[in-house]
Amino acid sequence: MFTHIESKNWSDVKEICKESMNHFVALLDSKESFQHDSSLPAFLRVYTPGSVYASTCWLGVDGYQKCKEYRESNQVISTLLRHDNVYMCHYRGRWYERFIINMKHLKVSPVKIKKYIQSALQEKHILETHKLILSERLKKTHEEHVKALERSRKKQKLEKDPEESIDNDLSEIFALKHEIPIMKIEGEKMYAEK
């Protein structure tokens, strides 16, 4: 897989990803092996076939991205997100980020994007850095949506009703229901002040 990625042979990367995806889905459907893998500690799950298939599928997403096949890429990512924090838990934030970016390429409605961001923010395996990135993406999506509504109103030459505000209309849609923790890093200075 890595040789195909290094040589930028994206068609072979996608084929390997499809094969890995078939094996991964079969593994997820097999209750015995899935239950065995979920009973293992997280540091041992890295060596299970499920983690190897998940890793290969994640590398295959890059092949789809390079070919601008965002729909197929999102299908792979949604399959990876389906397995309930068993394989590659620390990658879930990256998967959600990529999924949201692909949704923007596919011109998915902001309401659906908001739904996925909120489900990502509620997961316990998502790192705080990924939560911060996703909340910033939510703010950016809100701002882009407000600008698009303003442009459409200007095109239609509608006068703005003083009681009707775009921000009020969208405040419920884009309300962030997860509080991002604020962390302060303290430590010793590396050099003496002169």
Image (cartoon, rainbow, N blue to C red):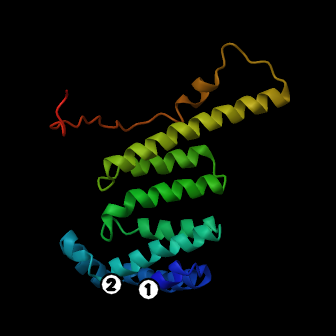
Front-lying residue, 101 or 35: 101
Query: In the figure, 87 relative to 3: above or below?
Result: above
Residue 57 located left or right of residue 50 = right
User: Callout 1: helix, strand or loop?
Assistant: helix
Q: In the rendering, which numbered label is found on residue 49?
A: 2
Q: Amino acid at mark 2?
A: Pro
Front-lying residue, 120 or 14: 14
Residue 71 in sight here: yes
Residue at x-position 44% and y-position 36%: 176
C-alpha distance separating marks 1 and 2: 9 Å
For the residue carrying disc 1, how many other residues have a C-alpha within 10 Å: few (<14), some (14-19), or many (20+)? some
Q: Extreme front residue here?
A: 194
Name the image quarter holding residue 173.
top right
Q: Position of residue 169 (x, y in %)?
A: 61, 27
Residue 1 in sight here: no
Front-lying residue, 38 or 107: 107
Query: In the figure, 174 relative to 1: above or below?
Result: above
Residue 155 located left or right of residue 91 = right
Residue at x-position 74% and y-position 18%: 160
Q: Amino acid at mark 1?
A: His
Residue at x-position 45% and y-position 57%: 96
Q: In the rendering, which numbered label is found on residue 153?
A: none
Q: Position of residue 65 (x, y in %)?
A: 59, 67
Residue at x-position 25% and y-position 73%: 38
CB contact under 8 Å: marks 1 and 2: yes
Residue at the spot of label 1: 23
